Structure formats: C-alpha cells, structure tokens
Amino acid sequence: MLGLGPMLLTSACRVPPLFAQRDLQPQCSFSTTASPQSYNYRIAASFSAKDRRFDPKVDLFSFDPLKPSLHRKDGPKQRRNSGQDAFFISTVGKSSDVAFGVADGVGGWSTSGIDSAFFSHGLCHYMTSVAQSKEEGILRTKELLQRGYDGVVADKSIAGGGSTACVAVGRNDGHLEVANLGDSGFVQLRLNAVHYYSNPQTHAFNTPYQLSIIPPKILARAKIFGGEPLSDVPRDASITDHRVRHGDVLIFATDGVWDNLNSTDVLKLVSRYMTGFNAWEAGKEGLTVSDNLKVLTQPGGIPKERENSIQSLIAVAITGEAKMASMNTKLDGPFAREVKKFYPRENFHGGKVDDICVIVAVVVQDGV
C-alpha cells in the first residue's frame, strides 16, 4: 500500500493502464424487439487473497444455473479465500437471465479500523437476493446495484467501509447490460480480439469511485480537520449496453488483475486456451467458433478433476497469472507504469500485491 491517494480513505492503489484509452463503443444498444436467438452464459469464478497462497483446486467456483445460488452473508471464517474482494453469480428470478459481478472492498478504510470485506461481501449477498427475488420484468443493473447498496446500508452489522463494483445482467436474448462503479472492470473478447473494454471511474490517481457507509465519528473528524470522505452512489455508475455473440468470452475482475495484467495479456491468455482446446478454430474463413464449444463449457468438458470446463480453466489461469505478476519485483506491471507517470520520483517497481477476483463467462448460443 503506497498511500498515494490524495483524499481521505482512498489508499486502494488502483488505476490500470488497461483503461488508459477511451472506451471502445458497444456495437448495439437495447432494442424493444426480441432477438430470435437464445443464449446461455457458462460462468466460473476464481479468486485469491493477497496474503494467502493460491490453490486452484479450492479457489474456484463453477456456476450451475440448476442449483440455487448461495447468498448467505458469511463471516470471515466462512468466506471464500478472496480477501476484501467478493463476487456473486445468480439466475434472475425464474428466468434464464443471469446476474453476476465483482466487488472490491477499499483497503484504505483499515486506517480507521474498518474491514471493507464486510461491505463488499455484504453487497454481493444483497445483490444475489435482489436477482433471485425478481418476479417480473427485466432486471436492470442500476436497480441491482441500488437495491444491493440499500441492503448494505440497512444492515446494522456493517458499520462502515467502501467498495467498488462491476456488475452485469446477461439476458437470454443476447443483450448484456453492465454497471461499473470504480476501478474494477471488464473486457469482452471475440475471436482473438478485444471487442470492448471498460474505463475506470476515479476521482484522481489511486482514488476510485466507491459505494460507502461513513460512520458518524469519521464525518465528525472530517468536519474538524477538513477533507471530505468519498461517498459515491449507485447512480454514479457507468451503464453500458452490449450485444453478445456465440463464443464471446467476458472477463469481469477486480483491480488485483488489471493492476498486474493489461488487456493484451488477458487476451493472449484466453486465446491460448480457447484455441488450444479448439473452442476457437482456424479455418478457410479465419478464426471461427468451433462445434466443440458447448461441450467444452459443460462440467467434464475438460478432462480435469476441478477445472473441468473451459471457463473454469480460464478463470484459474487468469488468477494464477495475475498472482505471479503481482509478486514479481523486477517486471513492472500496469500499476507500476502508472505510478511512474503520475509520481516519477516514487521508487515503485514490479507488480502490485492485492486481492484478486475473476469471473469468466463464455457465451453459448442454443442450437449451435
């Protein structure tokens, strides 16, 4: 933790160069006319706390839409090994739509004696509840984020803290809506190319937008000594609409990934597995989605005990690669390059050790 943030409670060390350029614009927006195609999202998540060894056999979650999603608000001893990072994946009501996303508890709150893991994990807990209880109509990400945040604020067991969030609702008709608040983010990969990547929301370098609960004592302290605690709200999130295709790979991750791997690194890694297992294949018309994709995304599609689907294998690979890069003290990662740009006198080199959380969704069109 460098403590470079210029504002109160912001020592999260996050601005990945992956997002230094402007957003690539999505190719289409929501339409009132339903698409005749039907799509499924085959999803897995992998994670690793910064102070723990990464175990791919344990630090992995494979989503099964036929099983109810767990959304209990676990205590520290029952949580997955993701530190202050959290994630959720859930079907939306009784539909075949799916809601998912990541949340990154802002570590700077620890200077005030507050563990933001309670906030980020609580936020994912309440967003899961919102998705599961949706009875009719389309769930929009703004509603998902707002009602999840309302649940955290109303929860008396969460005294304070803050978190970024990048959440999505993937619809059966192929429309994907994403709400991104802060410096977690996502990329949409299509046949060995980055089709779209998100930009972070930051107040300044190392100062991401964040949902928060500010205890009265911190507000009083700020009033006396000056400064204003960050307090962004769900409506501040950037909302983008996208259209998915058969064979697209969606990567949602916290800054533990983006501070250590850029978009090209992630694309190379995903392409290695998608082409290596013949999910994307080269032919006379260039790279196409193979007929093997549906099988590869099913449990047992990859002959391994735990990482037995292409999405789980990719999730574990990204987490492992980011973990290794974060501990490399010689090779400057995206975060180190940003530090040099904004603070050229800072002697910061290598990767940035942080909690890591990744969700990988492979899009499969029915009947293909």
Image (tube, rainbow, N blue to C red):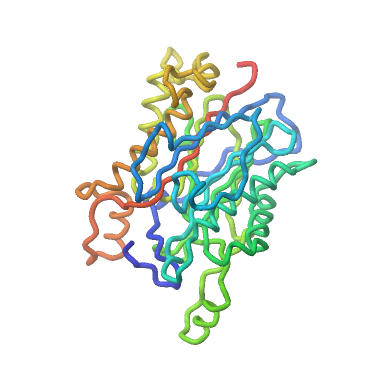
The picture places residue 87, in percent across and down from the top left corner, at 53, 45
Place of residue 175 in the rendered image (x, y in percent of width and height, measured from the top left):
65, 36
Numbered label tally: 0
| Image position of 199 (left or right of 242) | left
| Residue 184 spot, x, y in % from top left | 48, 51
Q: Quadrant of residue 246?
A: top right
Q: Is residue 215 above or below residue 211?
A: below
The quadrant of the picture occupied by the C terminus is top right
Q: Quadrant of residue 93?
A: top right
Closer to the camera in the image, 292 or 306: 306
* Residue found farthest to the left: 330
Q: Nearer the viewer, residue 236 or 155?
A: 155
State whether residue 29 is above or below residue 334.
above
Q: Quadrant of the N terminus?
A: bottom left
Front residue (pair 140, 85):
85
**In the figure, 282 relative to 180: above or below?**
above
Query: Can residue 349 be seen in this snapshot?
Result: yes
Question: Quick check: 212 above or below 53?
Answer: below
Instruction: Report the residue that reaches farthest toward the right.
Output: 136
Residue at the extreme front: 77
Q: Is residue 23 visible?
A: no
When asked about the image quadrant of residue 131, the answer is top right
**Residue at image coords 41%, 46%:** 356
Where is residue 335? Give x, y as percent: 33, 54
Q: Residue at x 64, y 64 (%)?
A: 156
Does residue 270 appear left or right of residue 145 in this picture?
left
